[in-house]
Image (cartoon, rainbow, N blue to C red):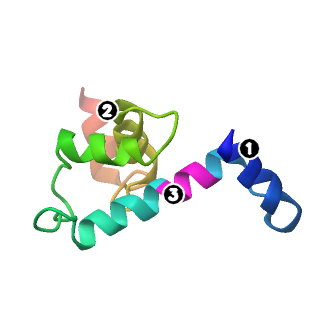
Amino acid sequence: MLWAVCALAVRSQLLTTVPQLQDQQLMMIVTELQAGPPQGKPLQAGHPIPDDVWMMVSLRMPGRDRTQVAQRWRNMLNPELKKGPWTEEVRADVATE
């Protein structure tokens, strides 16, 4: 419900959808945790994020559990993901399998 209200509030100006707002919030939360979580040392980029951290993140994402936010980060939002075309080396590896 909160996401729908937020999306309606900015839709006329930015054409933002509820999933886009949720993705933006998830990116902000993980970026904050990488800068320094409240109860410990910062998360290191390139290292997997522990399950207990995903639980903390999901508490700040209404309607989402830790598995959902972790999968969204790993499969779609992580800036370390390579989304460009495959290299010749990867194409060769796939062809040999």
User: Does the magenta segment cover residue 39?
Assistant: no
Residue type for callout 2: Ala
Residue type for callout 1: Ala
Q: Are marks 2 and 3 in contact (CB under 8 Å)?
A: no
Q: Tell me how far mark 3 sits from mark 1, CA to CA.
A: 14 Å
Q: Quadrant of the N terminus?
A: top right
Q: Where does the image place residue 71, in percent across and percent down from the top left?
A: 37, 37
Q: Which residue is mark 2?
A: 95
Please, what secondary structure does the residue beneath circle 3 have? helix
How many labels, in total?
3
Q: Where does the image place residue 18, in percent across and percent down from the top left?
A: 68, 46
Q: Looking at the image, which residue sits at the far left?
A: 41
- The magenta-colored residue range is 21-25
Q: Nearer the viewer, mark 2 or mark 3?
A: 3
Q: Which residue is mark 3?
A: 25
Q: Where does the image place residue 82, in percent across and percent down from the top left?
A: 38, 56
Residue ID at (63%, 45%): 19
Q: Looking at the image, which residue sits at the far right?
A: 12
Instruction: Check disc 3: other Cα within 10 Å, few if <14, some if 14-19, many if 20+.
Output: some
Q: Quadrant of the C terminus?
A: top left
Q: Tell me how far mark 2 sits from mark 1, CA to CA.
A: 45 Å
Residue type for callout 3: Gln
Along the line of sight, the residue nearer the viewer: 6 or 30:
6
Closer to the N terminus: mark 2 or mark 3? 3
Residue 75 falls in image quadrant: top left
Residue ID at (43%, 41%): 72
Q: Is residue 35 left or right of residue 31?
A: left
Q: Which residue is mark 1?
A: 4
